[in-house]
């Protein structure tokens, strides 16, 4: 029996999508073979790949100024691809450190470019997301990098950035959860394994202007422009992940697009945070307007109950609630594929657990 999956990633995939994949896995559209058995150069596959890209562009309303790439290496690969590509614009880049993922990005970039940490909440253990007016933006850096939704800490910045500079955002755990004005960013990247589809794919939305300024003295596989020329098929792409992502995009469109998910995601997060705020048994210390709508972190006031909480929740089919090992506590990741019902079931369980152990 499938449970309610609160995993941070790889995360829940819409059940309708999994069923569709199951139904056509043996033979795809009278082609005589499974989609994972055909060349990415066949008409069958390129048609599917193109349609997937177009659906993504449509869902996010991506302007013609920007290119969309489907790459490998996950979001982590972007930590190095970004400085490699843009260090010829300037020998320094601005990084905001607001949680574990943006810190990792800055540490990797430091090996390739001079990194200016223009704002950091590391000393306060990432209890606050540095606000835009606190960012000490440099005049001569190549770009600003930040991570608007920190998956491990469950902290987020909800307003869009407005800088007259190339802004680069790691949107791995927030992309497709709400409408987005892509024009505010020169580059957006995301590992697929939350709101896009299975792991193995990373999506990059890059302004053509920035792409054209990039370093051309790199191996092809590291250049955004080469991936663009090759329609993201410079080498064999992760065909299965791309195919499933295509199904997730159709599911998003059919459900009502990003506005629908924005409303649903707000509602889910509201139910969960309202409950957390009403209880002394559970704790979430993040400032109300900086709380992530995707990754809801919380602690039990009595941490000795952690194991019982996880065991009992699992027995109720509420899965993967353990927080990241670096952060501790609990985390309920409630991406698009988590229905409202799953969140209600979680709150119900948490109430019962509190009355039993509180
Ligand atoms: C915000 C963020 N950035 C980067 C990563 C790393 O992604 P990947 O494992 O695809 O490299 C993750 C993974 O969960 C993430 O949540």
Image (cartoon, rainbow, N blue to C red):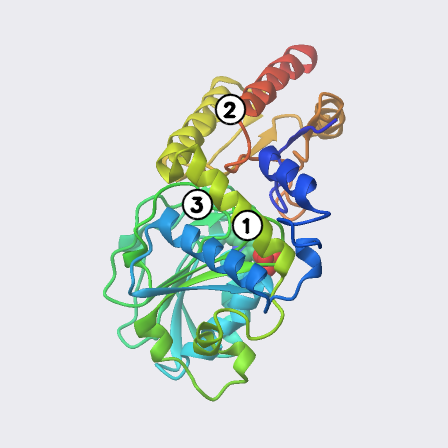
Q: Nearer the viewer, mark 1 or mark 3?
A: 1
- Separation of marks 2 and 1 at Cα, in angstroms: 22 Å
> Which residue lies at the image location 47% right of the left edge and 22% below the top edge?
271
Residue 329 visible in the current orientation: no
Residue placed most toward the observer, 67 or 92: 67
| Residue 151: x %, y % from top left | 53, 46
**Is residue 321 placed above or below 184 in the rendered structure?**
above
Residue 32 visible in the current orientation: yes
Q: Earlier in the sequence, mark 3 or mark 2?
A: 3
Q: Earlier in the sequence, mark 2 or mark 1?
A: 1
Number of labels in the image equals 3
Q: Nearer the viewer, mark 2 or mark 1?
A: 1
- Separation of marks 3 and 2 at Cα, in angstroms: 17 Å
Q: Name the quadrant where ligand 1 sits.
A: bottom right
Q: Is residue 279 left or right of residue 169?
A: right
Q: Which residue is mark 1?
A: 245
Residue placed most toward the observer, 35 or 246: 35
Q: Which residue is mark 3?
A: 176
Disc 3 crowd rating (10 Å Cα; few below 14, some 14-19, many 20+) is many
**Is residue 228 placed above or below 277 in the rendered structure?**
below
> Which residue lies at the image location 52% right of the left edge and 67% below the top edge?
79
| Farthest top residue in view | 355
| Residue 152: x %, y % from top left | 56, 46
Q: Quadrant of the N terminus?
A: top right
Q: Which residue is mark 2?
A: 340
State the image quarter where residue 308 is shown: top right
> Which residue lies at the image location 68% right of the left edge and 39% below the top edge?
23
Q: Is mark 2 within 8 Å of ligand 1?
A: no
- Separation of marks 1 and 3 at Cα, in angstroms: 12 Å
């Amino acid at each position: 029996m499938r449970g309610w999956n609160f995993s941070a990633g790889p995360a829940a995939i819409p059940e309708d999508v999994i069923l569709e994949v199951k139904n056509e896995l043996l033979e795809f559209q009278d082609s005589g073979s499974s989609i994972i058995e055909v060349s990415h150069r066949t008409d069958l596959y390129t048609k599917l790949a193109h349609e997937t890209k177009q659906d993504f562009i449509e869902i996010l309303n991506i302007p013609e100024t920007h290119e969309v790439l489907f790459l490998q290496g996950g979001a982590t690969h972007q930590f190095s691809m970004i400085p490699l590509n843009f260090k010829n614009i300037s020998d320094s880049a601005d990084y905001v450190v607001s949680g574990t993922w943006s810190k990792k990005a800055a540490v990797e970039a430091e090996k390739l470019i001079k990194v200016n940490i223009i704002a950091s909440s590391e000393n306060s253990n990432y209890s606050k997301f540095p606000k835009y007016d606190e960012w000490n933006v440099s005049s001569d850096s190549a770009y600003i990098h930040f991570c608007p939704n920190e998956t491990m800490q469950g902290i987020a910045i909800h307003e869009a950035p407005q800088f007259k500079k190339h802004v680069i955002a790691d949107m791995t755990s927030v992309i497709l959860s709400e409408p987005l004005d892509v024009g505010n960013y020169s580059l957006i990247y995301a590992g697929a394994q939350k709101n896009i589809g299975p792991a193995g794919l990373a999506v990059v939305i890059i302004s053509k202007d920035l792409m054209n300024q990039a370093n051309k003295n790199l191996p092809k596989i590291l250049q955004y422009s080469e991936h663009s020329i090759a329609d993201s098929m410079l080498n064999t792409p992760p065909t299965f992940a791309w195919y499933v992502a295509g199904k997730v995009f159709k599911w998003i469109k059919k459900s009502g697009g990003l506005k629908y998910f924005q409303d649903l995601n707000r509602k889910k997060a509201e139910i969960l945070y309202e409950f957390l705020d009403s209880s002394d048994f559970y704790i979430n210390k993040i400032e109300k307007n900086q709380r992530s709508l995707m990754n809801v972190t919380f602690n039990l006031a009595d941490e000795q109950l952690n194991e019982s909480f996880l065991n009992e929740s699992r027995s109720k089919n509420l899965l993967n609630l353990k927080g990241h090992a670096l952060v501790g506590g609990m985390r309920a990741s409630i991406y698009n594929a988590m229905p409202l019902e799953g969140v209600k079931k979680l709150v119900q369980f948490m109430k019962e657990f509190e009355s039993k152990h509180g």
